[in-house]
Amino acid sequence: MKTILITILAVLSVVLVGVLGWQNWGDIVSKINPQKIVSCVAKTDCVLAYTGTDACAPCDPADDSMQCVSSIKATNLQQERKKRYGIGLCRLKCLLPPQKFVCVCQNDGSCAKVAVSQPVVSQPTATTSDETAGWKKHGNVYAGYGVNYPNDWIVDSPQIYEDAGSQIKFYSELFHSANKEDGNIAIVLYEFPSDIRGKISLAEAVKRVTGISSGEQVKIGRFDALKVGQWPDLGMPNGAYFLLYPSGTLFGINYTSKESETKKIFESMASSLSFMPSQ
């Protein structure tokens, strides 16, 4: 009888440890529920990560367990999974998902998962000229803008890079005709280091990027903007508009071309710019 009692107690202990183990894991997950995270300042602070408890993360980013969290939370989640399953976490060979998602830092400081296919805006916030009304429309949820561009022009894939000296991160999209010798128009996001992000004025931000300390004050949509003339570093005739997002990210649109027609297209594209309400 005593032996049976000891056996029962042993079994209950194992079950209890197992339940408590899963309960603790559940507590960890609930504490870092991505819906409750208020930790981002800029979009680069948010990453798409697996927030579930299984060894294998799903291939489909549309799965509810794939959420946008801070990079610190993503690391913590992975470390907890490694503790439970060992260093050999499941590695799935995933095919290209049917839909792409990006992480956006919202005004309340939370990370949001947004489908790339989602339209940026239904109607432009800036006045669109008759010339651009029939042009192709380009929307970028990650960068938070929409713009019209000529029907015979091309948009290159976004490029992301960082300047080692200034530690400024660049996110760039290039628009151009089939003949690149005609010049190009670039839309660029400049992400400053966290120690100065959101703490410098538009003029100071532009100076850090271009070296130019003055420009014409204009309006683009609901934003105060700065129009800069010849930008020495770009060489051939050029010009740019800059504005600051509330997050402290600098938004710029510039052209580089010897062709006067490209400058006209640049001005028309700038007038067609629209921005997501969250920017």
Image (cartoon, rainbow, N blue to C red):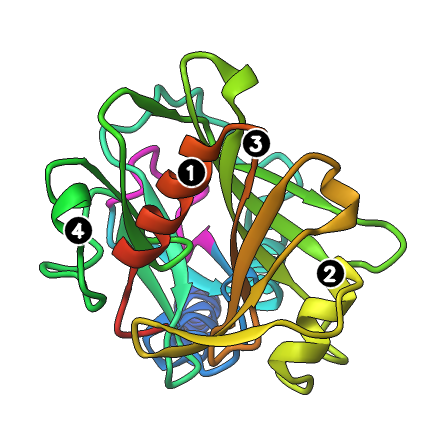
Question: As shown in the figure, which amino acid type bears the numbered disc 1?
Answer: Cys
Give the labeled residue for mark 2. Answer: 209
Mark carried by residue 56:
1
- Mark 3–mark 2 distance (CA, rounded to whole Å): 20 Å
Question: As shown in the figure, which amino acid type bears the numbered disc 3?
Answer: Ser
Give the labeled residue for mark 3. Answer: 257
Give the labeled residue for mark 4. Answer: 119
- Mark 3–mark 4 distance (CA, rounded to whole Å): 30 Å
Seen at 42% across and 38% down, the residue is: 56
Question: As shown in the figure, which amino acid type bears the numbered disc 2?
Answer: Val
- Mark 2–mark 1 distance (CA, rounded to whole Å): 43 Å
Front of the two marks 4 and 2 = 2
Q: Which span of residues is magenta-colored?
A: 48-62
Judging from the image, what secondary structure is the residue with disc 1 in? loop
Front of the two marks 3 and 4 = 3
Seen at 66% across and 40% down, the residue is: 87
- Mark 4–mark 2 distance (CA, rounded to whole Å): 30 Å
How would you classify the magenta stretch by its main secondary structure? loop
Q: Residue 160 location, x and y as percent?
A: 61, 41
Please tell me which of labels 3 and 2 falls first in the chain.
2
Q: In this image, 232 relative to 110: left or right?
A: right
Q: Nearer the viewer, residue 135 or 50?
A: 135
Q: In this image, 72 relative to 13: left or right?
A: right
